[in-house]
């Protein structure tokens, strides 16, 4: 793919690291389509990354009666928008499922989004969680970046990352692993630029306007907000490069001097 692309009761459980490979809204607009049936032949791209371990909605005990039963799909994922949840940072990773259920309630009951707005969430231990329902490997349309929910995936870092707040290395690795896999399904280079077309006048761009974004952008790039916070926004270049490395796009060591490897993944429970 070229550098510029256009695609308009508590139970305890131990979860594996996000680094182990597994074999495995807005209202929909006009070109949203039903995803091809399972078994349909897929195009194989030369630069892909393994699917990281993802904690499913059933594992964090999402109440599926709260959401819109119908997921909506785009034609593919061309870019990723990074968010933060603007929640406290002093949580234990074992308690994240409870945090997710609270976010889920707020976004379905109070915001009327029909489901979690984010497609995925990542905690400070690097654990990755399925957010919006519809299939982790499918191009599910979320409600995360108004005007640019089409053809994008929303990944939320659990916490608040204002100026001077350290971004955990494990969280960065989890985000990069997820982005490398998700963009790799369409052969998108995480360090590339993409063109997206706004579907809503409330975004930074009027409806129908095309704009150029990084393949991994911050929420603020598409909407007037501080999200994902100054500290996390400043780490996006490093996350893009790590995601590209995970796709095998460079000869750099997987972990260079940019960030030390630290923080072993936690093991969330479903309480």
Image (spheres, grey):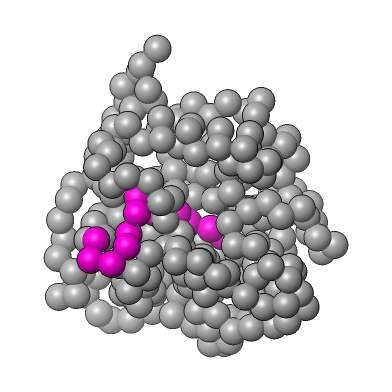
Image-based side of 118 in relation to 199, left or right: left
At which x and y percent is residue 26?
Answer: 71, 55
Residue closest to the eye, 192 or 81: 81
Residue closest to the eye, 67 or 79: 67
Instruction: Name the residue: 73% across, 81% down.
Output: 209
Determine which quarter of the picture holds residue 231.
Answer: bottom left
The main secondary structure of the magenta stretch is loop
Q: How many marks?
A: 0
Determine which quarter of the picture holds residue 245.
Answer: bottom left
Image-based side of 52 in relation to 166, left or right: right
Instruction: Name the residue: 55% across, 37% down.
Output: 106
Can residue 135 be seen at all in this image of the molecule?
Answer: yes
Identify whether 53 is placed above or below 41: above
Determine which quarter of the picture holds residue 190.
Answer: bottom left
The boundaries of the magenta stretch are: 153-165
Give the quarter of the figure containing the N terminus. Answer: bottom right
Instruction: Name the residue: 14% across, 65% down.
Output: 260
Q: Is residue 71 magenta?
A: no
Instruction: Name the residue: 32% across, 74% down.
Output: 234
Identify whether 26 is placed above or below 68: below
Give the quarter of the figure containing the C terminus. Answer: top left
Image-based side of 118 in relation to 84, left or right: right
At which x and y percent is residue 270?
Answer: 39, 25
């Amino acid at each position: 793919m070229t550098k510029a692309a256009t695609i308009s009761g508590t139970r305890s459980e131990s979860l594996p690291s996000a680094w182990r490979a597994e074999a495995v809204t807005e209202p929909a607009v006009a070109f949203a389509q039903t995803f091809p049936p399972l078994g349909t032949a897929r195009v194989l791209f030369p630069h892909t990354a393994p699917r990281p371990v993802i904690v499913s909605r059933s594992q964090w005990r999402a109440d599926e009666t709260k959401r819109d039963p119908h997921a909506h799909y785009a034609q593919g994922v061309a870019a990723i928008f990074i968010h933060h949840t603007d929640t406290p940072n002093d949580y234990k990773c074992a308690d994240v499922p409870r945090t997710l259920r609270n976010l889920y309630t707020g976004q379905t009951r109070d915001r009327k989004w029909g489901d979690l707005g984010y497609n995925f969430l990542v905690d400070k231990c690097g654990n990755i969680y399925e957010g919006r329902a519809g299939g982790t490997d499918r191009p599910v349309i979320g409600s995360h970046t108004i005007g640019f929910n089409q053809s994008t995936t929303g990944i939320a870092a659990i916490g608040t990352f204002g100026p001077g707040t350290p971004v955990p290395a494990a969280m960065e690795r989890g985000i990069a692993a997820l982005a490398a896999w998700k963009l790799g399904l369409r052969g998108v280079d995480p360090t590339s630029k993409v063109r997206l077309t706004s579907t809503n006048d409330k975004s930074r761009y009027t409806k129908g306007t095309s704009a150029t974004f990084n393949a991994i952008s911050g929420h603020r790039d598409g909407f007037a907000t501080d999200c994902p916070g100054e500290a996390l926004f400043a780490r996006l270049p490093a996350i893009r490069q790590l995601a590209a490395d995970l796709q095998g796009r460079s000869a750099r060591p997987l972990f260079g001097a940019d960030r030390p490897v630290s923080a072993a993944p936690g093991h969330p429970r479903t309480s």
